[in-house]
Image (tube, rainbow, N blue to C red):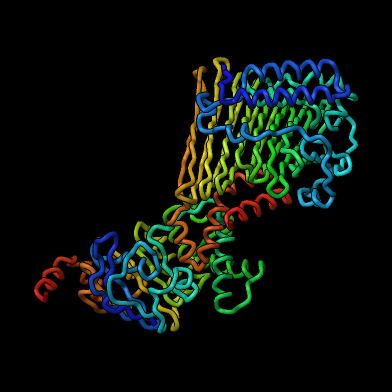
């Protein structure tokens, strides 16, 4: 599904990713962990298409297409979904108009008919349940006045409606209390299937108790320095990242 | 306060000569008192001259382009067809319309069907005859010309306009729509539309005034409106300014409110090469409520200047003002919002906010809130922001699959939503909405 090869990325002249390789197949959950400033969020944002990043070298292959050549909306319509670390408040645009536009744009891209109002609300009602959100959210402006937890749940709700093939969760767990964390993880787990894949970018091992990854990668200084299964996350929780720095230093 | 300087004395003389021609063409119609008002006004105008940028309130707006052209009053009614006017009507919702072409009332194009006890609506020329006493009581008493040359000029040429009088405790059953059209003529037209609206105690009315231009007609619309809202009366007002992009539009509006009255005014500017709106509100009794909403959308090299003045003269009044602008290309905007809280106006609550979205590097706005507070127990807030479309918000929408153009349209739409939602008639709001969106496609 996704093949990132030797990716080098800079922002405002500072190189952040320094030759990152990662392959993600359908049905898999990959966790990307690493200390602050290691490039985790850069990776998530580059995949979603944020344009202030400059790709210096390498590439990203998504279902055989050059992902980096695609506009953000084309990526989204092709099934890439970024759950934002800091969801944006957009006063004046209702959740309902926003999601309906997004959903129908994606359907048109696939050559499908637009959903009518009834079908749309049917779908919305079902998906709101996934994240325990009230229907009243639909008439509110996007994220405006939402609590931190509501904003994160809203991200997962949008993911549920749009049914992406590749979901990238950018520190969705940061700042969540345990109840909200459970709701968010349940949502993600409900949506998992053999045809989609998830990249979970996180700072904390705690999330991985709920969303169990197939692979755990450690990102340091713009490279994946170690990969393993979920036990690697536990090891990191226990020992921190310093031991890896030493290990990487020795290999370098 | 303003003195004629040499550069505009020729223009002043031009209008003084126009007045002579106008005066000699009058054949009675108005009362002697009205004519005396005209003469006083034109004298005052001769004394004041046109404002220059040395005058503080005209610092950002140069009227020289208006003075360079030789505008005259329309000599006869312009022959526009019902079809030409139809597109400016809100035919689904509003039956009562008054149509003015180049400042001249057109009976055949107007559809004034409302017949209601206590409601007097006509053009002013008719009101001079049929409601002389009411006209004399109100006309020129509120929109004073002592220090405002454009008001003086309009008053000098006062000949026709709108007259609405609503008797005590009468609610006008339907909204009234007044349509002004600037049409090309053999001369360059100076129209002086006038509105006189008086709501007596406990009365209610909704008025829409719209200004349109035919193609690229060059004309100068010098508008004055007097709105007298007596005790406990409610007035809803909407002004839609869609003049031709080659036209000049100067307006002076005065809302005079007595105790417990409520005014809600929405002012939308789309058109005009040079636009200047002076909107003054006097809260002359306690417990008044005033809502002022404004939206100015400019492109090309349009210049749109909005000056508002809310005078809190009495205690316990509430005023809320929100003006928003969207400017593209080389367009220039000005917003100057003044709030005066006089010593007696304790417990005043006055809010003001101005937000402008600049869509191009060469577009600019000068925003200046002015608060003068002489009472000690008041709540006043003001704020002005100027910015671009929010990149973060744009990316968020695109990251959900919404195309770039659509995403931009949604954000612009969102920006104006809190103004347009104040327009309660669906058909009118939809028109404004579409108009805002169309402005971005140019």
Where is residue A91? Give x, y as percent.
Answer: 52, 51
Q: Nearer the viewer, residue B363 or B294?
A: B363
Q: Is residue B30 left or right of residue B221?
A: right
The residue at the far left in this view is A250
Quadrant housing the N terminus of chain B: top right
The x and y percentages for residue A236 are: 21, 69
Q: Is residue B171 visible?
A: yes
Q: Is residue B2 above or below residue A51?
A: above
Q: Residue at x 75, y 17 (%)?
A: B39
Residue at image point 85% right, 49% down? B82
Q: Note whether residue B347 is visible.
A: no
Residue at 52%, 41% in the rendered image: B332
Query: Horizontal and vertical percent for residue A111?
Result: 59, 79
Question: Image quadrant for the C terminus of chain B?
Answer: bottom right
User: Which quarter of the picture shows residue A69?
Assistant: bottom left
Image point (71%, 19%), residue name: B41
Vertical placement of residue A36 versus B288, above or below: below
Question: Can you give x and y, in whole percent of width and height, for residue A57 in the image?
Answer: 27, 74
């Amino acid at each position: 599904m996704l093949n990132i090869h030797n990716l080098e990325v800079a922002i405002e002249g500072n190189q952040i990713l320094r030759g990152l390789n990662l392959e993600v197949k359908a049905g898999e959950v990959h966790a990307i962990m690493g200390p602050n400033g290691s490039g985790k969020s850069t990776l998530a944002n580059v995949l979603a298409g944020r344009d202030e990043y400059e790709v210096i070298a390498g590439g990203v292959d998504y279902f055989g297409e050059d992902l980096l050549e695609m506009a953000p909306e084309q990526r989204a319509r092709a099934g890439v979904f970024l759950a934002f670390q800091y969801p944006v408040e957009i006063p004046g645009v209702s959740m309902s108009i926003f999601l309906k536009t997004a959903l129908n744009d994606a359907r048109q891209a696939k050559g499908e008919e637009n959903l009518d109002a009834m079908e749309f609300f049917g779908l919305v009602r079902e998906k709101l349940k996934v994240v325990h959100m009230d229907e009243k959210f639909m008439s509110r402006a996007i994220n405006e006045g939402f609590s931190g937890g509501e904003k994160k749940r809203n991200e997962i709700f949008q993911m549920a409606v749009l049914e992406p093939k590749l979901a990238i969760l950018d520190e969705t767990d940061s700042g969540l209390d345990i109840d909200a964390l459970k709701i968010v993880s349940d949502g993600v787990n409900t949506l998992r299937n053999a045809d989609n894949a998830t990249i979970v970018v996180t700072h904390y091992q705690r999330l991985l108790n709920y969303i169990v990854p197939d692979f755990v990668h450690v990102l340091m200084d713009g490279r994946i320095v170690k990969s393993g299964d979920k036990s690697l996350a536990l090891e990191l929780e226990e020992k921190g990242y310093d031991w890896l720095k030493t290990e990487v230093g020795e290999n370098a | 306060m303003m003195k004629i300087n040499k550069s505009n004395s020729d223009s002043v003389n031009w209008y003084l000569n126009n007045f002579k021609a106008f005066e000699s063409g009058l054949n009675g119609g108005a009362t002697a008192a009205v004519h005396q008002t005209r003469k006083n006004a034109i004298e005052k105008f001769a004394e004041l001259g046109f404002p220059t940028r040395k005058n503080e309130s005209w610092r950002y707006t140069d009227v020289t382009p208006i003075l360079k052209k030789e505008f005259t009053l329309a000599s006869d009614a312009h022959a526009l067809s019902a079809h030409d006017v139809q597109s400016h009507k809100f035919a689904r919702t509003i039956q009562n319309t008054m149509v003015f072409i180049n400042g001249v009332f057109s009976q055949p194009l107007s559809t004034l069907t409302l017949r209601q006890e206590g409601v007097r609506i006509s053009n002013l020329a008719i009101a001079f005859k049929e409601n002389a006493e009411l006209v004399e009581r109100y006309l020129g008493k509120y929109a004073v010309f002592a220090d405002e040359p454009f008001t003086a000029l309009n008053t000098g040429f006062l000949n026709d306009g709108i007259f609405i009088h609503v008797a005590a405790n009468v609610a006008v059953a339907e909204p009234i729509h007044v349509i002004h059209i600037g049409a090309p003529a053999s001369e360059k037209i100076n129209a002086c539309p006038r509105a006189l609206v008086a709501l007596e105690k406990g009365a209610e009315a909704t008025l829409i005034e719209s200004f349109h231009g035919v193609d690229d007609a060059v004309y100068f619309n010098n508008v004055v409106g007097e709105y007298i809202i007596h005790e406990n009366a409610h007035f809803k007002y909407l002004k839609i300014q869609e003049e031709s992009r080659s036209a000049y539009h100067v307006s002076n509006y005065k809302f005079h409110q007595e105790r417990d009255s409520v005014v809600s005014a929405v002012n939308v500017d789309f058109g005009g090469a040079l636009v200047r709106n002076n909107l003054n509100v006097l809260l002359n009794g306690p417990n008044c409520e005033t809502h002022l909403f404004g939206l100015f959308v400019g492109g090309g090299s349009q210049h749109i200047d909005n000056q508002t003045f809310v005078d809190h003269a009495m205690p316990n009044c509430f005023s809320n003002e929100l003006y928003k602008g969207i400017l593209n290309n080389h367009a220039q905007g000005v917003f100057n919002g003044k709030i005066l809280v006089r010593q007696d106006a304790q417990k005043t609550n006055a809010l003001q906010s101005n937000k402008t979205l600049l869509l191009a590097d060469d577009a600019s706005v000068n925003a200046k809130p002015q608060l003068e507070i002489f009472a000690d127990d008041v709540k006043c807030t003001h704020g002005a922001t100027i910015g671009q479309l929010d990149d973060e918000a744009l990316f968020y929408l695109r990251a959900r699959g919404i195309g770039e153009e659509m995403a931009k349209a949604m954000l612009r739409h969102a920006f104006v939503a809190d103004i347009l939602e104040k327009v309660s008639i669906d058909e009118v709001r939809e028109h404004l909405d579409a108009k805002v969106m169309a402005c971005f496609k140019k």
